[in-house]
Amino acid sequence: MKKSLLLVLTGLSLVVARAAAQEKVVTGAVTSEQGSPLAGVSVVIRGTGRGTSSNSEGNYSIRVAEGQALQFRIIGHAPEERVVGADNVINVQLRRVATTLDAVVVTALGQTTAQRALGTAQQSVQGADIAETQRSNFINALQGRVAGVEVTSSSGVPGASSSITIRGVSSLSSSNQPLMIIDGLPMDNKTLNTGVLASDAPGSLSAFSNRGVDFTNRAADLNPEDIESLVVLKGPEASALYGIDAANGAIVITTKRGKAGVGGLEYSNSFRIEATRAKPEIQRVYGVSGTVSPAGTTGQGTFVFFGAPYPDTTRFYDNVGDFFRTGVTQRHNLSFSGAAQDNRVNYRVATSLVKEEGVVPNSALNQINVTGSSGAQVNRWLKADLSMGYTYVTNDQPYKGVNGPLIGL
């Protein structure tokens, strides 16, 4: 019995010694197609939980047995697999592939989350789809593209403001617009109240507030050509990310960045012509009648009946058709971008010029945008990102409502 037990223990020790002898240290370097080192590449032994990652120079080291397979993975590159043989050095070159933006969703403070793992109701829109609409106010491009989103434009003149609501109106007194987030920073999309401009003149404050002037919403300051992707977060779930300001939802915008192998100097332009298609029919049979003014008024009254018929020799003019003009819009975009081969450092500088003349005389919008962004992956746990923008806008709009010019045509 003792002899049999001794033989069994000896056999087990031989098996363990042989298994230990099969494991060895495998080292190597992970590089891109251009030969640049790739940091943070996951190196895992297939079928096990053991693994490591490449350092800032792309080098790795792992204990593995012959015959086992090493899997190399990193976002933005095609995965590779190598079977360990007699060699102790395995160098791998990863091929860069395009990553679909639908698979990753930008959430609070610029963090990214897998779309399937996100528990909130959201929908994405690509920046290319927004830019191709050629809208000066990119908010108008969301109409009909996102379920539950309603966009209301105040008018069709250049620089007209647009409001947006998600899943209907939730308040009768407060703002119903969602919170705008651009590269992790919140932005107020509300329209400027004209009354505050007359705060130093209390006597004329009431008249100034009701003069019918429309100041555009602040989201129109963003150039649609600078948008990479847009995510609409619906419902109160957005409040969990951005607080009470996002009670009506949130629109998370990610601007473009420089990419390795893509970019350089780019220029694009577009031109659009607008004209009125129809005009109201005006009766040319009866003239103007007298008016009736209520007692105590200043003489303003209402026409109560048609006047006498126009004489046959009356000459009529097309006041409506002669009033409108042909509107012309031109947009010019210029950008310069680039990145390191491993995409650890990127940069982008862009500018745009918009000149829009509306169909109403003396209505125009001139807008200049200058934006810049840069990012650097310092190490595995530190990433630096810089974004800046400058917008200069001049906007001429006619009065609206009873003070508007269309009433007198």
Image: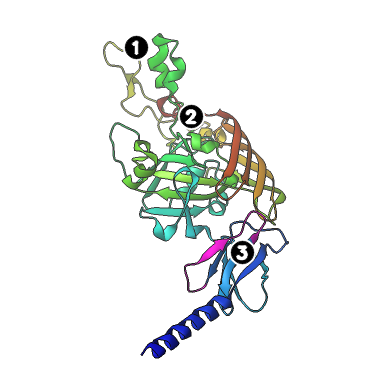
| Residue 274 can be seen in this image | no
| Along the viewing direction, whichever of 292 and 130 lies nearer the viewer | 130
Mark 1 residue element: loop
Which residue position holds label 1? 298
Left or right: where does residue 143 sit relative to residue 329?
left
Mark 1 crowd level (few <14, some 14–19, many ≥20, 10 Å Cα): few
Question: What's the image's color scheme?
Answer: rainbow
Q: Residue at x 44, y 10 (%)?
A: 201
Residue 48 magenta-highlighted: yes
Q: Residue at x 50, y 67 (%)?
A: 50
Mark 2 lies on residue: 215
Q: Earlier in the sequence, mark 1 or mark 2?
A: 2
Residue type highlighted by circle 1: Thr
SS under mark 3:
strand
- Mark pair 2, 3: CA separation: 61 Å
The quadrant in which residue 69 appears is: bottom right
Does residue 12 lie above or below 257 as drawn?
below
Q: Nearer the viewer, residue 266 or 398?
A: 266
Task: Point out the residue furthest to the front here.
Answer: 2
Cα distance in 3D space between marks 3 and 1: 92 Å
Which is more foreground, mark 3 or mark 1?
Answer: 3
For the residue marked with disc 3, what is the amino acid? Answer: Ser
Dot 2, how many residues are within 10 Å of its Cα: few (below 14), some (14-19), or many (20+)?
some
Q: Is residue 295 left or right of residue 146?
A: left
Of residues 308 and 306, the one drawn nearer to the viewer in this rendering: 306
Q: Which residues are magenta?
A: 46-59
